[in-house]
Amino acid sequence: MPGESIGPMTQTTSIMITGTFDLGEIAMMGFGHRDEHKFDGIMRMAFCLDGSYERQVGVAARQDDGRLELEVIAEGEPLNAAELESVRGQVARVVSLDHDGDAFDRLCLADPALAAVHARAPGFRPALFYSPYEAAIWSIISARRARGQGIALRARLAEQWGAAFDVAGVRTLAVPTPSQLAAVQAGPGLPSDRIPRLHSIAEAARQGRLDADRLRALPPEEARAQLQELPGIGPFYSSLIVIRACGHADVPAPEEGHSRAAIQEAYGIDHDLSDAELAEITQTWKPFRTWVTVMMRALADREIPATAG
């Protein structure tokens, strides 16, 4: 039944790491529903698998030298080879191991302003939502709520309608699959106007409209426009889905005010950046404008470690 712990069916696989990488930085980044307060060497995940989103898995990720080792817990039958490869690709996207990390390091080190920020946490990479489907669910349930309230509501939705996995000794929740989401009629704290919006998300997923590869292949503005056809997804949340769920490394987000402020400080600029000035600076960050923008915001208030060069 949805929400009950699922007996383990564990398989293993791994992802090669390129560039400086620190799994703890990604696990502790804090965004969307993730709100970890400590890191024990394991990043725990539970999500609907790319493709139809109709299979849920739990994943325990551990960093070991130049690899990210994954323990994958599946419900029912073991994952086939294609499904296990899909897990690898999805986790790589979530922890930003799907692009050339060495090239990112070189870009940061070549720019003194970026190098100073990069030195605060050299292994930092953006953490992403598990998929556009799950980012769309988060967009609906968290709209006009404090993030903590959104986190609690997501947990209740997953408890009642989704699945739970024992991931390295911690009960970890996966949101409902599209078929499970389509059956949701009511839930504690879930406003009635969100139900038909969640059903629209389920239907869009079943039609393939929330496939990460399909959305990433579109020009970002077109992807945003298509997402805004979904009830409850406006400009802000369509950008969130495109930038923080599809796996882009080079989509700028000039409207993000906190990042603008961090960029101004890093480059020693004493006035509000114009769009033209911002575009000129971010142009030098290609092909990692998304990664650098997220790094700028996430590490803005971080002190440079005493051991940093």
Image (cartoon, rainbow, N blue to C red):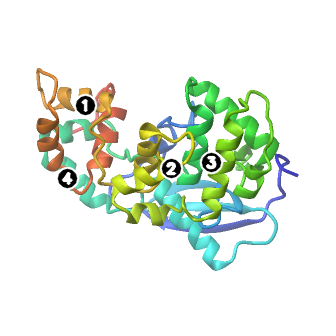
**Left or right, 221 with reference to 10:** left
Question: What's the mark number on residue 233?
Answer: none
Q: Between disc 3 and disc 4, whose residue precedes?
A: 3
Q: Between disc 2 and disc 3, whose residue precedes?
A: 3
Residue placed under numbered mark 3 in the picture: 44
Eye-nearest disc, 2 or 1: 2
**Mark 2 to mark 1 CA distance (whole Å):** 28 Å
- Kindly check if marks 2 and 1 are in contact, taking CB atoms under 8 A apart as contact: no
Residue drawn at (54%, 66%) of the image: 88
Q: Is residue 47 above or below residue 39?
A: below
Dot 3 falls on a residue whose secondary structure is strand
Q: Between disc 1 and disc 3, whose residue precedes?
A: 3
Question: What's the mark number on residue 229?
Answer: 2
Residue placed under numbered mark 4 in the picture: 107
Q: Between disc 2 and disc 1, whose residue precedes?
A: 2
Could you tell me residue 81's position as x and y percent? 63, 79
- Kindly check if marks 2 and 3 are in contact, taking CB atoms under 8 A apart as contact: no
Could you tell me residue 36's position as x and y percent? 58, 34
Residue placed under numbered mark 1 in the picture: 260
Q: Is residue 131 visible?
A: no
What amino acid does circle 1 point to? Arg
